[in-house]
Image (cartoon, rainbow, N blue to C red):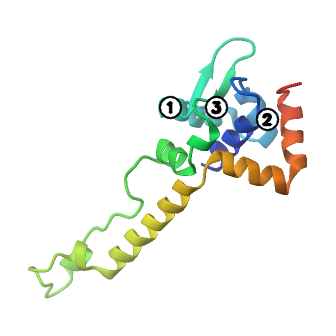
Amino acid sequence: MEWAVHSCVNMAWTPAGEAVNSARLAEYYSLPGAYLNKQLQALVRAGILVSVSGPRGGFHLARRPENVTVLDIVLALEGADPVFRCEGIMASVPNADMERNVVRTCLISQTMRQAELAWRQALARQTIAGLADSMDRRFPQDRQKALRYLAVGS
């Protein structure tokens, strides 16, 4: 996930429609190229990125960066299923109350569902544009370094 979010931030910094080469991205971050490319292809399938073929090919954002949230990326890579799945183990303890809906009444399950909801809401509020702008303000040299290395816009 981290790799995909960083890659999308790099793409937000590039001129609109200009492709970022996935091999250069992988090299820049010292990542395994095949696995990064697999993540980027998942983002293409989710409509977050566009894949461009040819000698100047690569990937670019399919939507404006303010219309791509971190949650969009997480869902594209991990799916929409909840991370925590209550198995209802309280129904298996000796003398369990068989009338009780343990999934709905289990405080551990409720805690985990509330935490996941808060996590998803926080990720939905964070856009790639917001991250790119924040990173550029705090570490302006990072944008220029990335763009020079990726040979985008030069």
Residue type, mark 3 in image? Ala
Q: In this figure, which residue is indicated by the disc labeled 3?
A: 34
Residue type, mark 1 in image? Gly
Closer to the camera, 54 or 64? 64
- Secondary structure beneath dot 3 equals helix
The residue drawn where x is 53% and y is 29% is 44
The residue drawn where x is 47% and y is 67% is 118
Q: In this figure, which residue is indicated by the disc labeled 1?
A: 47
Mark 2 / mark 1, whichever is N-terminal: 2
Frontmost of labels 3 and 1 is 1
The residue drawn where x is 26% and y is 75% is 89
Q: Residues within 10 Å of mark 3 (few under 14, many from 20)?
A: few
Residues at discs 2 and 1 in contact (Cβ within 8 Å): no
- Position of residue 58 in the picture relative to residue 119 (left or right): right
* Quarter where residue 103 is shown: bottom left
Residues at marks 3 and 2, CA–CA distance in whole angstroms: 11 Å
Q: Position of residue 154 (x, y in %)?
A: 89, 24
Q: Position of residue 131 (x, y in %)?
A: 69, 51
Q: Residue furthest left?
A: 99
The residue drawn where x is 51% and y is 43% is 77
Q: In this figure, which residue is indicated by the disc labeled 2?
A: 27
